[in-house]
Amino acid sequence: MINITLPDGSVKQFESGASPMDVAKSISEGLARNVISADFNGTTIETSTALTTDGALVLYTWNDKEGKKAFWHSTSHVMAQVLEELYPGLKLTLGPAIDNGFYYDIDFADAKIVEADFKKIEDRILEVSREKHEFTMRSVSKAAALELYKDNEFKTELITNLEDGTITFCDHATFTDLCRGGHIPNTGIIKAVKIMSLAGAYWRGNEKNKQLTRVYGISFPKQKDLTEYLELLEEAKRRDHRKLGKELELFAFSQKVGQGLPLWLPKGAALRDRLEQFLKKAQKKAGYEQVVTPHIGQKELYVTSGHYAKYGADSFQPITTPAEGEEFLLKPMNCPHHCEIYNTKPWSYKDLPKRYAEFGTVYRYEQSGELHGLTRVRGFTQDDAHIFCTPDQLDQEFKNVIDLVLYVFGSLGFENFTAQISLRDQENREKYIGSDENWEKAENAIINAAKDKGLQTVVAYGEAAFYGPKLDFMVKDALGRQWQLGTIQVDYNLPERFELTYKGSDNELHTPVMIHRAPFGSMERFIAILIEHTGGNFPLWLMPEQAIILCLSEKYEIYAKKVLNLLENHEIRALIDNRNESIGRKIRDAEMQKTPFMLIVGEEEEKNNTISIRRHGQEGKGNVTVTIEEFAAIVNDEISKTLKVFNVE
Ligand SMILES: [Zn+2]
Ligand SMILES: [Zn+2]
C-alpha cells in the first residue's frame, strides 16, 4: 500500500500502481470526469501514471492553470499530427503550452502554411479529437530516439542534450513526439480549437539559427468557451491603451525623442496630474512629507545601494563630464536619494516614522523588443515613498499603507484583487540578509496587517526580496486579466548600506527599518491599466472633460459661454463644441471622446436657463432637461460615490 497526501492535508491509502485517475474516482465520479492533469511531489505526470511510492498528489481540472496547460499542450500534439498529414516533409521542433493556448515551431521546408489553411487544420484537429485517442508515454533509448529523428536536426539536437534513460516519447493515434509528459487523458475532451496566427521564430530564439514558422493556437472543452474567448480578445483590442491613448489624445511616442519614452499630451498630463494630486492629498493626511530629488546621481551612490550591480551593465551607461573620473547615472530607483535625505539629520526614536514621498522619475534600459505602450517603458514615474521606522512601528505602518492602497483602488474602481504575501523560502534561509528575529517581525507584521484589514491573500514562500518580505496587490481588470499593481516592501538592507541610524530609548544608535511602497506602481503603467480596465470611461472625478456643451446652432454660442462659466464656478471641467457641424456629428465626436455628459443648448434651453443632458453611451434614452444647479448636483453626487475622503484611523 502507498500513502497519498492530498492538498487538504488528508492522507489516503492505495494499492501500489494506482493512478491519479483512480485516486480521483475514490473521491468522486464528478471529480474523475473533470480531472485532466496531475502533479506528484512537484512533478507533472499523466493521469494514468502508476503511483508506486508515498507522496503528495494534486489533481487538476480545466479550471486550474495547470489543467489548461495540459489541455493546450495536448492539443499541440494533435495539431502537429494534422500538420504532418497536410504538409508532408515538415520538421517539428518544440510545441509548448503558453499563457493563452499553445504554439508549435515548425520548419515547413518547401511547403508554405497560409491563413486560408487554418479552417481546414481546425476541422481536422476536431475530427481526430473526436476519435478519443489516449496519450501514452513510453521510454526510448537515446540510440532509438536519434534513429527515429535522423532526418530532423532540431529534434536530434534536443535528444543529444538529454541523458540516456530519461528520454520519453508520447504516442496518440498514429502520431509520436519527443515529449516529457503532462497530457490530458484523451483527445475526446478537445471540443473547440482555433489556429490564431503565424509568426517567424528562430530555432532556440537565436537569430543566427534557422528561422522557423510558429503556429499559434488555442483550444477549449466547449465551443462556448472559444466564442467567449474570441469576444474578449476583440474587446481587449478595442480597449488597447495604445489605441485609446491616441484617440483620447492622452500620450504619444516620437521616434525622434526615443523609443520607450512617452510624451504626455495636455489631456493626458492633466489626467496624470489629477491622479498625483489625489494621492498627494491622501498622503498628506497619512503623514507623508513630499520631497524632490534629481534625475541623476553619482555612480558611487548606486554602487553603495547595490543598484549599480543590479542594473549597471544592462542599463543606460554612466554620463561622463569634463571633470576627469566624474560619472553620473540616470537614477534607476529613488530609494538611495531618500536614504540620503534621511541622513541629513540625526534622529531620535521619538521623531520616527519619517515618511518621504516623491513622484520620482526613474530610467531603466528595457530591450526594444520588450517595450510595450505605457506598460513597458524606459523612463517612468513612480508614486514612490519610503518610510523609515523602528521595528516596533512596522506593524502599524504596514496597516496604514494598506489603508492607503485600498483607498486608491476603491476610488479608481478596482474592486477585484488579491494580496500576495511574499515570504522567505523556508528551506533555504542563507540567501536572505538580516537577522531571523527581524525577518520574523516583518513577516508577522505583513501577515497580521493583511488579516487585520480583511484582505483576500495568498502566501508565496520564496518570493520575498533578498532584503525583506513584501505584499503585492494583484488586480483583476474588467476583462478578467490579472495585473500586479501596488507593492509594499520591507527592507533591512538599504538602511545598513547607507548607515542610517536613530537614537533609541536606550540612548544607543539603532538601524531603522525601511518600507518601500507605491500604490500605483508607476504612473505610466497604472494609467495604461486604468485605460484598459475602464475602456477610457474613467471615473467621473478623473475624466479630462466631464461635460461638453453642444450648441444646436451658432445662435446659442453666447448662452453656451454663460453655461460654461457657471460650470466653472461649480468646478466642473467642460468645453464648448462651437464648430459649424450638425448636432449629430457633434454628438458622435463627443461619444468618441467618451465625454460623460453632453449638454445640448438651443432655443428652449436659452429661454428657460436650462441644459439638456445626454449621457455617454446611452443613445436613445432621451435627454433630461435640468438647470445648471441641478446638473452640478448630479455631477457632485456621482463623484462622491467613488471619490471618498481619505481618513486616517
Ligand atoms: Zn507532450
Ligand atoms: Zn524604494
Image (cartoon, rainbow, N blue to C red):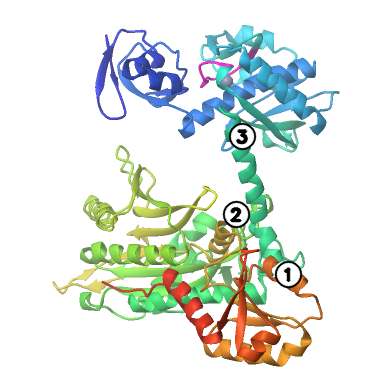
Give the residue type at disc 1.
Asp
Q: Which residues are magenta?
A: 176-187
Q: Tell me how many marks there are.
A: 3
Residue 216 horizontal side relative to residue 361, left or right: right
Point 71% across, 25% down: residue = 122
**In the rendering, at what x and y percent does residue 390 appear?**
24, 67
Q: CA separation, marks 2 and 3?
A: 41 Å
> Depth check: 469 or 4 in front?
4
Question: Mark 1 or mark 3, which is nearer the start of the sequence?
Answer: 3
Residue that carries the numbered disc 2 in the rendered image: 314
**In the rendering, at what x and y percent does residue 474 appear?**
44, 52
Point 68% across, 91% down: residue = 559
Which numbered dot is residue 226? 3
Q: Secondary structure at mark 2?
A: loop
Q: CA separation, marks 3 and 1?
A: 34 Å
Give the residue type at disc 3.
Leu
Q: Of tags 2 and 3, which is closer to the observer?
A: 3
Q: What secondary structure is the magenta-colored segment mainly?
A: loop
Say few, some or many: other residues with alpha carbon within 10 Å of mark 1 (under 14 / 14 to 19 / 20 or more): few
Q: Secondary structure at mark 1?
A: helix
Point 30% across, 67% down: residue = 400
Give the residue type at disc 2.
Asp
